[in-house]
Image (cartoon, coloured by chain):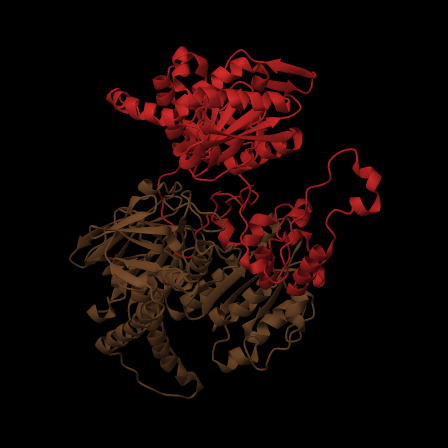
Amino acid sequence: MPREILMPELAESVVEGEILKWLVEEGDYLKKDQPFVEVMTDKVTVELPSPYEGVLLKKLAKEGDVVKVHAPIALLAEPGEAVAGVKEAPPVQAVEERSIVEPGLPPKEEKEDLSLFKPDTTQVVVKNPFLQETKPKEEARPQGRVLAVPAARKLARELGIPLEEVPGSGPLGRVRVEDVRAYAERRKAQPAPEAPREAPPALAPGFPPPPRYVPPKGYEGLEERVPLRGIRRTIAQGLWQSHLYTVRTLNVDEADLTELVALRERLKPEAERQGVKLTYLPFIFKAVVRALKRFPVLNTSLDEERQEIVYKRYYHIGLAVATERGLIVPVVRDADRKSILELAQEIADLSAKAREGRLAPEEVTGSTFTVTNIGSVGALMSFPIINVPDAAILGVHSIRKRPWVMPDGSIEARDIMYLSLSFDHRLVDGAEAAAFTREVIRLLENPELLLLEM
Amino acid sequence: MKTYDLIVIGTGPGGYHAAIRGAQLGLKVLAVEAGEVGGVCLNVGCIPTKALLHAAETLHHLKVAEGFGVKASPEVDLKKLAAWRESVVKRLTGGVAGLLKGNRVELVRGYARFAGPKEIEVNGERYGGKSVIVATGSEPVALKGFLFGEDIWDSTRALKVEEGIPKRLLVIGGGAVGLELGQVYHRLGSEVTLIEFMPEILPAGDPETAALLRKALEKEGLRVRTGTKAVGYEKKKDGLHVTLEPAQGGQGETLVVDKILVAVGRKPRTEGLGLEKAGVKVDERGFIQVNARMETSAPGVYAIGDVARPPLLAHKAMKEGLVAAENAAGKNALFDFQVPSVVYTGPEWAGVGLTEEEARKAGYKVKVGKFPLSASGRALTLGGAEGLIKVVGDEETDLLLGVFLVGPQAGELIAEATLALEMGATVSDLALTVHAHPTLSEGLMEAAEALHRQAIHILNR
């Protein structure tokens, strides 16, 4: 009996994974533990090893599909099991220059997926596009090849219009260029969400529908469309959730880090001797953890289902890292139990892994508070978005020499940094947020206080 | 390292189309060619073969012209024929080189090898490309027991008519290449025997029209034996003793010939390319796996033409080249076209779309209209009354599904059928279009009428 391969539990609290890429084809022979599919969960990509040995009978999910944990993703036949329809891989064989198809070769039962890579393994595809796409006729008509002239097919692709949505005016419903144009016009003319104007009171429960994107007339050809996939989709979903389900409020303050700058300069050579590049982040992490201990409400989550506030007595600090693939938040676990040097080392390791896309699922989950280092890019001030389910996120900015009024009234050039704390006002009061930020600043301005944490 | 927007490996039909379209779309393009610009098609494929076919056909026409009162005693000057063949090739390859240059495509000569995902090495020099199109084509495949050499020819060697016309020639393979070159040698004076493993020549085509082509060739004097395989040969004083056997095995027999042309197929050319370095996957037959956008398994790397997938046809490669180049330039192009096939024998054979059998398998209620060229005024005045035009349609919707024909100029006639299919035409659309009289294309209209039992020049029984 063929066995199902199920989506494994990739990490705690991971409930689903997106099929990013199949690494093998149907009919391929899999060794045990051979990676066979690339799956993306949360913000990391893993190659799943095959749990058994055997022939991959069928892929049960397409690339781009999101599959729940424990749901089947593939069918595997056991070794030696005779399986109808799966050929043993034949040796490389020649193909006649013009006539290639073995007579009677059955057309493959594959539907075309144009958006992601998927090899067209059958030669019938090119020879007779009709054959591939018009399988049994009943199902073929609605979803098979749409009857359309070549110029209409091209125009529809350019405008990003699914051809099957366009009513054809030609014989047999053949879609012509004018049909595509008319459809595009109608689509543009449609007012976006209609609900607000008609019945304003009805707006109250639930969210309005998302806005509908309509290209400016005449500029459709100058646009390019990229499917929302992979990390970008995860980012989009996470941030959308954060935006819709937190009451985001901003608290801004500034810190004089002149002493910390000097301290770091002094410690740098020693850290380097131990093979660690010392940045400001480990100090900031330390200060944050200490402040979190004093203001535990910043280290909470809201369990909406149970209507409970979850106070955490562990300090997992997330660090937002910009990578080529997008934003990733690796998590430094138990930051309260680590030394400055250990934190420096771990932050460096996680950042490198993030940029290389090698993070394990457990390395990007479970943060209790997040720090985002905007300084490395160089904005004066930014309003970070909360990394749900955290209660707050601290944005730290570049350290620059700025004129500073000293206690004696004189003005000096000091090393100043802005901090922006973005917090969920449902959980955290404004005064608490401000006090928390002040505490972080107090510790950073007097780094010797951190000695007590080391 | 020099970097480009687009690197095209190979300047055969697919490659030069891709390079030129890429340049037209504003990309900085590098083309790499290991052999001659123009690839197999222009240098040792379609073009020189068709030149020889035309010469052989002219000779044949002069011989049969006596039947309508034109007498001639033609002679063939093989040296001059070869020189003309080469001049045609030179002119076309020179033209392609000029087009590449005129479009500011840089050309580097040598074998390309992937050094990384989007990096290639040619003659020790590295080149980086935002996109790479693999267009390395294919090469003849050898047959077990028949090593290419002095006596065993591949299609490239067979072009060299100037080196002599063998008295007796065995052609192994009843596909386009075998049929075309077989007929060239037959018309230039060889005694040609052609064998095909499958029960009919052109095994992928419509069997009815393929059989008509076989009969026409046999009538001309070519010996065609289908369902036959060659298992080995022995060189003796009086020639090559080839052992032929029925395809399913059984009693063998010996055929004595002077040369053997092996035309059993071609295989994709991927060796030495270092595809694994780029992460490009091939299928079990060695073809690079591609999707409808001509993308391979490696992002930014495309494959087109013979190296990508069958059918191995220059015009398929050309369109695929355009699709790949457009996608490399950020457009959204798909290869979703109908691909016609043509065999340039006399008479020609051509086909596009679904055969009756394929249409039935696809679930259509198939109806077929046929028009024999013996009823075509134009065919008769051309001296070639042999032939058939066949239209495959769906009875329920009248949708045109396929067209297959054998007859003079079939390769030109198939263009109308291909356009009709591409436009989603009905059989009635073909029937209702006025075709000039007398032309061969009228036959297509009549075949469409015949599907509705309304052809004028035949009895619709």
Looking at the picture, how far across and down is residue B278, in whole percent?
34, 43
- In the image, residue A419 sits, relative to residue A180, either above or below, namely above
Instruction: Evaluate whether residue B386 shows in this view.
Output: yes
- The chain assigned the colour red in the figure is A
- In the image, residue A121 sits, relative to residue A167, either above or below, namely above
Q: Is residue B412 left or right of residue B239?
A: right
Quarter occupied by residue A449: top left
- The chain assigned the colour brown in the figure is B
Instruction: Evaluate whether residue A28 shows in this view.
Output: no
Closer to the camera in the image, A224 or A426: A426
Closer to the camera in the image, B64 or B336: B336
- Residue placed at 44% from the left, 33% from the top? A404
- Residue placed at 20% from the left, 58% from the top? B239
Closer to the camera in the image, B437 or B92: B92
Quarter occupied by residue B284: top left
Q: Residue furthest left?
A: B237
Looking at the picture, how far across and down is residue A418, in whole percent?
48, 32
